Amino acid sequence: MQPAAVPGLDLKTLMASVRGRIVQPEEPDYDEIRKVHNGMIDRKPALIVRCTGAADVVQCVRVARDSGMLLSIRGGGHSVPGFAVCDGGLMIDLSDAKGVRVDAARQTARAQAGATWGDFDHETHAYGLATTGGVMRTTGIAGLTLAGGHGLLMRKYGLACDNLLSVDLVTADAHLLTANAQENPDLFWGLRGGGGNFGIVTSFEYQLHPVNNVLGGLLVFPFNHARSILKSYDDFVTTAPDELGGAAVLATLPDGTKAVVFLLAYHGPLERGEDVMRQLRSFGPLLDDQVSVMPYTAVQSITEHFNPRGMRNYWKTSYLGPVSEDAIDAMVEYHARVPSPFTHQVIYTLGGAVARTGNHDTAVGYRDARHAFVVIGMWDDASRDEEQISYVRNLWSAVQPFSSGGFYPNYEGAVTADQIKSAFGPEKYDRLLSLKRKYDPDNIFRLNQNISPIA
C-alpha cells in the first residue's frame, strides 16, 4: 500500500525501520485495531504501529519525538480512560508482543508488555506459580503493574509492583535501558506506582509464588440484608488471614435481582480456608454459593462475565478506612436506584502484605487504607451517557466524606493536576516530578495520569 502523507513524518523511513505492521486509517481492519475495552473511546490515530519488540518501540519514539506527533501506548487496552488511543497521532500497539518466559527454578517470569494477565497466568500456572495480577484475565500486565497493581493475591504477596524485579524501558530520547534495584534504582522506584510517565516498558520481570488451586468463587446474598452484610464484612477483614483476597460488591444479577456479592479467593491450608468461608457465609441468607476449590486461573476469569468488552465505562474511586454505617447507607441507597444493571460498587479489600510493605519503598500511596472503593459505571446506550455519568459522580460524592484520602489512579479518567498530587501525597509527588523532569522533560509520555514536568 502506498503510504499516506502525515505532516512532519517520513513514513517511508518508518516503514523501513520497523518489523511490525503499520496500520493506516484507510485499511479495512483499522477500526477494529483501534478499539479498546471501553466502548466510549472513539479516537482515531493517524498511524498505528503494531510493534513486535523493543527495537520497534525505539524507532516509534524517535519518530514521534522528531516529528512532534502525539504518542499513545497500548498494552492490554483495558484502561477505562482509554489513554492507549490518541486522535491524530501515533499509536504504539504492543498487543502482538505478549511472550512470557517462566524460570521455574528461580520462580520468576519475564513477560512482554502486550501480555494480558490471562496470557501471563496461563504460562505460570503450568508450573504451579503465580504473582499478584488483577481480577480479570483481559487486563494488561503493563498498565496494572505500573500503577501499583491490585489483585486477589495482594494481601498475601503484595501488589503487582511489589513483585516486580526488573523492567526494560524505552526513554523519551529513544534509548533502551534496564531499571531494577541495582540499575537506575530511582527510575525503578518511580515506575512502581507512577504509571507510564517515564517511558515505555517493553518487558517486565516478576517474582512468582507457589499458587495452584484456591478456595474461591462467589457468595451471593439478598440486597435487603446489604447493610448488615457489608458491616459484618468490614469488621471481619480486620482479622482475616492474609491468604484471603477479595471484595464485596453491590451488583445486579443477570435476572435483574439486586444483591451483595463476595468475590473470594483463599490461598492457603484448605481446612483453614473452609473455616473462613463458613464465617463469611454466616453474614446472611445465601441466594447462591459458588465457592469451591478451583484453579487460580478459573477464579481470575469470573469477573469477565460482569465486564464485557465494548460496554460504555465511567469509573470513580477513593480509598476507605473502616466503612461507617453512614457510608454504607449512601452505598445502599444509591444502589437501590442504580440506572444500569451493569453498574456496580466494589469494596476492594487491601491490608496484609500491601500495608506491611514500606511506604517509601515504591511510589504507591495510601498503603494503610483498608479498602479501595470503586464505582464502576457500565451501560450500552450512548444516549444515556449524561445520566449514567451523573449517577456515578453523585454516588462517589455521597461516599467521599467517609474517604480516608487519595485514590487509586488506574480507576480514574480525567483528573486535575491537584488530584494527581493527592493520589501520591506531596512528598512522593515531588519525587515523581523530579523523575519526570529527568526522564521526560518535554512530556512526550503525557497520555496517562500525567505528572507534568512544567511547573
Image (cartoon, grey):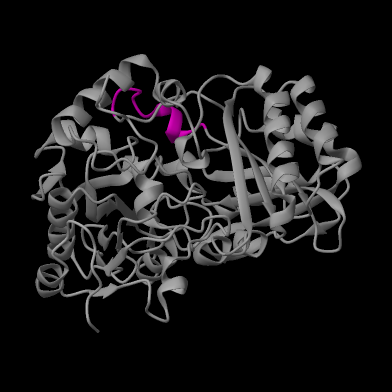
Is 325 left, or right, of 182 in this rendering? Answer: right
Q: Position of residue 162 (x, y in %)?
A: 33, 40
Q: Can residue 136 be seen by looking at this rendering?
A: yes
Q: Residue furthest right?
A: 224
Is 167 left, or right, of 345 in this rendering? Answer: left
Q: Main secondary structure of the magenta part?
A: loop
Is 22 left, or right, of 350 in this rendering? Answer: left
Q: Is residue 76 above or below residue 197?
A: below
Residue 206 vs residue 320, the one in the foreground = 320
Residue 103 vs residue 273, the one in the foreground = 103
Q: Position of residue 146 (x, y in %)?
A: 34, 43
Is 51 left, or right, of 38 in this rendering? Answer: left
Figure disc tally: 0
Q: Position of residue 450 (x, y in %)?
A: 35, 34
Q: Quadrant of residue 375?
A: top right
Q: Is residue 347 above or below residue 56?
A: above
Magenta stretch encompasses residue 354: yes
Q: Is residue 184 above or below residue 108?
A: above
Q: Can residue 208 be seen by looking at this rendering?
A: no
| Part of the protein shown in magenta | 351-361
Q: Position of residue 391 (x, y in %)?
A: 74, 38
The residue under the point 20% across, 49% down is 167
Q: Quadrant of the N terminus?
A: bottom left
The residue under the point 25% across, 64% down is 104
Q: Quadrant of the C terminus?
A: top left
Magenta stretch encompasses residue 37: no
